[in-house]
Amino acid sequence: NYGLNSPYRADPEQPIILYYEDFDQNGAIDPILAVSENGKQYPYVARDDLIQQLPMLKKNFTSYLNYAQTDMSQILSRLPEAKTDTIETLHSVLLDLDGQSLNEWKMPAEVQSAPIYAIESFDFDFDGDQDILMAGNNSYNRVKTGEIDANYGVLLENQGDLTFKAVSPMRTGINIRGDVRSLNYLPILGRGYLIFGINNGQIKCFEQERKDQVYN
């Protein structure tokens, strides 16, 4: 659910790999994120951040040039054996359980603008199909990554056969700024209400005006 609007890139041929272990044996897990380029893995983390996390590596990387020429195999050779998690896609996707198989469907481009943290499913247009509303954002990244906050509340209209079309904000009236972490649809006395919980911000409420996707 991270989306494609970030410096990160991942695919099966060049995945992102998270190496982790309590390398300095202080009781806390030490993660090292690595990205692929030309068949090799390189640390995504900056030299100063890595040394701050694992001071015992300072003697091995005495300059920024030395660190820039270092791949993950050289770093890992100086550390205890690490566990790994691998990311092969950053697309926000729909997973459909069909019998014993799990099928993956990539969501529309409008969904890929920011990480998704809140999802609500409901028949927003009253046509008998379940539509999906997605919100999220992440404004508190390291400087190297930057703010990823271009999702203002994306409503996906169910077209049938597990296909969805993003609805224009001009039609929905939904325009949420900030890092959304919760989302609920509440039907009350024949009307619908969307409640957005925003990190370090006020709750936002949208009231449905009529039986389409328009809120205010």
Image (spheres, rainbow, N blue to C red):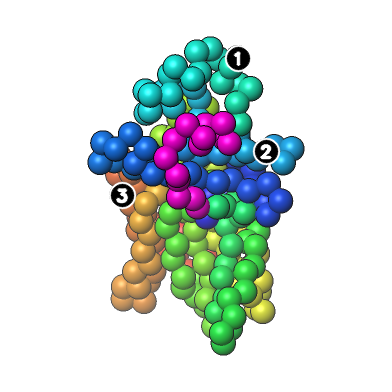
Q: Which mark is residue 40?
A: 2
Q: Position of residue 126 (x, y in %)?
A: 52, 78
In the rendered structure, are the residues bearing label 3 and label 2 in contact, judged by CB atoms less than 8 Å apart?
no
| Label of residue 65 in the image | 1
Task: Compare residues 119 and 50 and report the one nearer the observer.
Answer: 50
**Other residues around mark 1 within 10 Å, as few (<14) / some (14–19) / many (≥20):** few
Q: Secondary structure at mark 2?
A: strand
Residue lying at the far top in this picture: please name it. 63
Q: Quadrant of residue 30?
A: top left
Q: For marks 2 and 1, give the CA distance.
A: 18 Å
Residue at horizontal 55 percent and vertical 52 percent from the top: 86
Place of residue 190 in the rendered image (x, y in percent of width and height, measured from the top left): 36, 76
> Is residue 13 visible to the viewer in this orientation of the structure?
yes
Up the image or down, 96 lies above or below 33; here it is below
Q: Which residue is disc 3 drawn over?
A: 203
Which residue sits furthest right?
38
**Residue 56 x %, y %:** 38, 24
In this view, the residue in front, 14 or 2, is 14
Q: Is 37 situated left or right of 199 in this image?
A: right
First to last magenta residue range: 72-85
Mark 3 crowdedness (10 Å alpha carbons): few <14, some 14-19, many ≥20: few
Amino acid type indicated by mark 3: Ile
Residue drawn at x 60%, y 14% is: 65
Q: Earlier in the sequence, mark 3 or mark 2?
A: 2
Quadrant in the picture for residue 162 = bottom right
Q: Earlier in the sequence, mark 2 or mark 1?
A: 2
How many angstroms separate mark 3 from mark 2 (CA)? 45 Å
Numbered disc in front, either 1 or 3:
1
